[in-house]
Amino acid sequence: MTVHERPFGGYLEDFVVGDVFRHWPGKTITEYDDHLFCMITMNHHPLHTNAWFAESETVHGRNVVVGNLVYSLVLGMSVPDISGSCIANLEVESLVHRYPTFHGDTIYAETRILDVTPSRSKDDRGVVMVESKGFNQRGEEVCYFRRKLLVWRREHAPARRRPYGEDVWD
């Protein structure tokens, strides 16, 4: 029998400048998702939560998904491949919303490795700079951001353990 461990995030040595990670799966944003996110974050702008207002008072004529939800989805989609085992997220350098996202749009994401720099002061870690893009189902880039992560070197990372024994299938 073979046991397949799914890595969650990577170590400094795993990241190669130029590599692209296509994150899976995508997520269709519902009206409920958008309204709940708006209420949780206290963004009560009627562009996001009032269909009549959006139809009669805005250039799009319909509700627009709040941009922070789109950003959060793209960031979250990248976690299993990019930052799941990092020490810290250090910085979001830029964030651009290129096209609006609407209820019913499906967001997909990918991340490119821009730079990998071993730490000069601590040999157990380094900084990885990435750019992530979110696309809708039509292939339009709706969100773009760059960020820096503090990442363990493999040999210094804490052990990845499960809360139960290794022999549960025996």
Image (tube, rainbow, N blue to C red):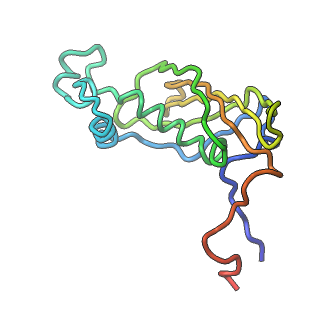
Tell whether 22 sits left or right of 19: left
Residue displayed at 48% across by 38% down:
73
- How far across and how far down the image is residue 17, in percent? 79, 30
Taking depth in this image into account, of 39 and 118 the one nearest to the observer is 118
Pinpoint residue 6: horizontal percent, then vertical percent: 68, 58
Task: Point out residue 109 in the picture as x, y percentages from the top left corner.
Answer: 57, 36
Of residues 117 and 143, the one drawn nearer to the viewer in this rendering: 117
Q: Position of residue 39 (x, y in %)?
A: 27, 37
Q: Residue furthest front?
A: 121
Q: Quadrant of residue 92?
A: top right
Relative to residue 168, is residue 11 drawn left or right?
Answer: right
Q: Nearer the viewer, residue 83 or 142?
A: 83
Residue 11: which quarter of the image? top right
Is 159 in front, or is 45?
A: 159
1 on left or right of 56:
right
Numbered marks: total: 0
The structure residue drawn at horizontal position 54% and vertical position 37%, both measured from the top left corner, is 75
Q: Which residue is rendered at x = 29% and y = 43% of the image?
A: 32
Residue projecting furthest to the bottom: 170
Determine whether, in the image, residue 60 is placed left or right of residue 151: left
Split into 4 quadrants, where in the image is the C terminus?
A: bottom right
Question: Where the N terminus falls, by quadrant?
Answer: bottom right
Say which residue appears at 29% left-offset and 13% top-offset.
Answer: 59
**Above/below status of 144 relative to 22:** above
